[in-house]
Image (cartoon, helix red, strand yellow):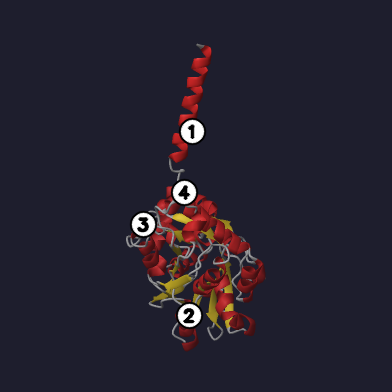
Amino acid sequence: MISRTRALIFICAVSTCLVASLLPWPVRAQSEQEFFKGKTLTLVIGSASGGGYDTLGRIVAKHLTDHLPINAGIIVRNMPGAGSIVATNYLYNVASKDGLTIGLVQNNTPFEPLMGTKQAEYDVSKFNWLGSPSVETGVLAVWHTVPVNSIADVENHEITVGSPGAQSTPSFYARLLNETLGAKLKIIVGYPGQAETSLAMQRGEVDGYLFFYSSLMATQSAWVKDGSLKLLVQYGQKKEPALGDVPFASDLVKTAQDRLLLQAGFAAISVGRPFVAPPDVPVDRVAALRTALAATFADPQFIAEANAANLGINEPTTGAQLAEFIAATYRTPSVILDKLRRLYSQ
């Protein structure tokens, strides 16, 4: 009886193995690397051609292919408008959510909904933030013929500054400097980007512009070196060492509330130049894009080319760090936010 039982168990075991061998093997899930092979990636740049964002985006696109198997290359598409809100709306509401469309948007865009901007038709918490190659510092610069030589002079002498739109970053920062430093900056809107405003300065249509330092050096470093521009004040979360004795806005304010106002108002500068993917992109593809961008930002060839273009690649930020910083900014005390919103909506 025992031998017969053992024989039956053996026969059943063999039968099970034979049946299992005839079943198809489980299909291995497609890896994120396999997904990107042979595909074409589209990089949407939310700024006009010729500026610092455009320069950075095209250099990143050139080197990103070394860290992501995009055999068919990367298409760069400029989509300027409303300080990158047009591009950010597109990425949120229209762009494909398969991981093959990403964006490089101006750093004001994560905070437009916080400021109550109605044109911002997106929820920043649902975006997939991918990373940034740097932390920005802003600088107010005027053409050399303008009769001011310091930010103190601008307290008594009104100057004009070009801007893409009333709610764009340059406009907001101009109002913020007016509020906290007593400056008299008159905003002239209608210039799509830095390139157009720089030309307007040469023509005498406007006196100055609120640059990002990296954009300024990427596109107009000769103007800084030959004195065509006068740099009046720098601003942001930290000083730019290369700006030397150009005064720092946070050192000039007279009250603690104004200092807090500057810190919250310049939060956008801390996100640098953010790369982002639309909502609902599969998690593994987001991870692949984040990894590829981080590798690009650390790539010696990318760094060398970016530095040659004076892009100021200094402190790369991961996608997770970007997402956390943006979320923290949305937790700013309401008393500060109310004042910022008033400044922003003027």
Specify the quadrant of the image occupied by residue 221: bottom right
What secondary structure is found at the residue carrying circle 3? Answer: loop
Q: Nearer the viewer, mark 1 or mark 2?
A: 1
Q: Residue at x 54, y 86 (%)?
A: 145
**Tags 1 and 3 in contact by the CB under 8 Å rule?**
no
Q: Residue furthest bottom?
A: 203
Name the disc covering residue 195, or none: 2
Amino acid at circle 1? Cys
Q: How many neighbours does mark 2 have within 10 angstroms: few (below 14), some (14-19), or many (20 or more)?
A: some
Q: Which residue is mark 1?
A: 17
Q: Which residue is mark 4?
A: 29
Q: How many neighbours does mark 1 have within 10 angstroms: few (below 14), some (14-19), or many (20 or more)?
A: few
Amino acid at circle 4? Ala
Q: Position of residue 260 (x, y in %)?
A: 52, 54
Amino acid at circle 3? Tyr
Amino acid at circle 2? Ala
Q: Residue furthest top?
A: 1
